[in-house]
Amino acid sequence: MSDMNLPPELSDIPDAVALPKRRRSLQLVWIIPILAAIIGASLAVKSYLQRGPVITITFKTGEGLEPGKTKIKYKDVEIGLVKGIAIARDRSHVIVSAELTRESKGLLVEDTRFWVVRARISGGSISGLGTLLGGSYIGVDAGISKTKTPQLAYKGLERPPTVTMDRPGRQFVLHAANIGSLDIGSPVYYRRIQVGEVIAYELDKDGKGVTLKTFINEPYDQYVKSTTLFWHASGIDVSLDASGVKVNTESITSILMGGISFQTPDESRSAAPATPDSTFVLFDNRDEALKRPDTVIETYVLVFKESVRGLLVGAPVDLRGVTVGEVTKINVELDPVRKEFSMPVEVQFYPERLRARYRNVSDRAKYTDSKALMNSIIENGFRAQLRSGNLLTGQLYVALDLFPNAPHAKMNWSKNPPEFPTIPTSLEQLQATLVRIAQKIENLPLDDIAGDARKALQSLDTTLKSADKMVKQVDGAVVPEVKGALDDVRKTLDEFRKVLGGAKQTLAPDAPLQHDMRETMRELSRAAQSLRGLADYLDRNPEALIRGKKEVQP
């Protein structure tokens, strides 16, 4: 609008002029927050990228565990930290959440194990003493599973594992009737050298036995063959049987916390080593384990008339010092016809232990049958007899031997088990002999003998009276002459008394002869000491006979 067209009162107002649009500029005050946000974001991204896996571990209690303080270590190297501890909903356990490093991701496999390391005293070992100052921590045993998917939830062990996954050796399984004094950590011995230990045990599902897991270290695991025998070596093994008292133990450690021993029979040492997790039987003792495994076992019954007190189940059946069987059952029976008791003893007989020598092929074929062999030797007086194995304990055993004068007997194969013929013990035979002697004495005509003896005594009395009369006659005729002889004897005794007086003076302690005798004995004693010293010197230095005595250096 032109100034000419404006009214006079508006002509002095200046015209508005449009300015060009200016660009916005960043204020200096916003630079610092923006830089801080960028740094924080980069740290968060870096922390997220470097963050390791978060796992959960369940334990029965949270003893010794603190969030933010308790560390997780593998081979004493820190690989994580406990972040939190919570109680499970059913309040039966606690749940520990922990964060591990990225490098430890490869350790989280299916069979990895976690446990709380703290000071422990178990059996004869003490562990975890370092935690008394540094505090408890969670230990890790890396598993050997090759699964690619990592596991993030674990059930912690209540006690440290006895054997770690990377320990060289092999595991074996043992079955036993009872665990005895064994426990986790009990030693395993081979020829009295500790080569392994018990790592776990559990009761069988049927409740009739116990299953134990043992670990044998390298290189001793190569001595475990498929035929290896294991037995209890716990404490002190004391046995009392017909052969006496036996005491056996492996070591002081096995006395305190038990132990297991194993051995491979000599005839099977060339066998290949047993595969891992092979199963074996754990015997009660060494003698039971090393018994010869007999493939042929025959059962017989021995019927004894005498007492079997001292005979126990398990007593040996002995053939001239060689055990060929054992007692398995002892009974008592009443014969209703004879009204007497009998003691049937059931035994197991191992015929393979009787190594017969055959002179020709026909004999070999004849005695291949066990019945034919048994009938043949029974015809020659083969019998069973009870004998005392130990006078101290009074225990008995069954002895098999040949008795040529034994009454004729045959094997009764009709019974099940067959009845083997027996013969009374030597004591029973002695008692029977004494009874027969007593019976013969009882049958003697003692009354007639007593009458004859009475007549003989009367005749003797008459003879004595006659002799008395004769003595009186002799006394009157001979006594005067005897008195003269006694006077001569009295004179001789007086002379002998004088001789004794002189000898007494000679033998008195202060007599010159006694003094000379004592001096002589002293000289002989000193000479004997010198000869003894010379003999000792020659014994130490025999070369002195040739070279002479060495000079003593000043």
Image (tube, rainbow, N blue to C red):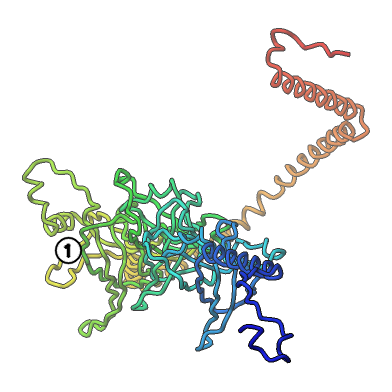
Q: Identify the residue at horizontal 63%, vertical 58% (top origin).
A: 472
Q: Identify the residue at horizontal 27%, vertical 80% (top origin).
A: 333
How many callouts does the rendering have? 1
Left or right: 137 in relation to 132: left
The image quarter in which residue 45 lies: bottom right
Q: Position of residue 423 (x, y in %)?
A: 27, 64
Q: Amino acid at mark 1?
A: Ala
Q: Nearer the viewer, residue 268 or 516?
A: 268
Left or right: 541 in relation to 306: right
Q: Identify the residue at horizontal 34%, vertical 52% (top origin).
A: 321
Query: In which quadrant of the rendered image does the C terminus lie?
Result: top right
Residue 245 visible, this orientation: no
Left or right: 434 in relation to 253: left
> Judging from the image, what secondary structure is the residue with disc 1 in?
loop
The residue labelled by disc 1 is 409
Q: Nearer the viewer, residue 226 or 313?
A: 226
Q: In the displayed structure, would residue 509 be above or below residue 454?
A: above
Q: Position of residue 331 (x, y in %)?
A: 30, 77
Query: In which quadrant of the rendered image does the N terminus lie?
Result: bottom right
Answer few, some or many: residues within 10 Å of disc 1's Cα (few below 14, many 20 plus, some between 14 and 19): some
Q: Position of residue 316 (x, y in %)?
A: 34, 61
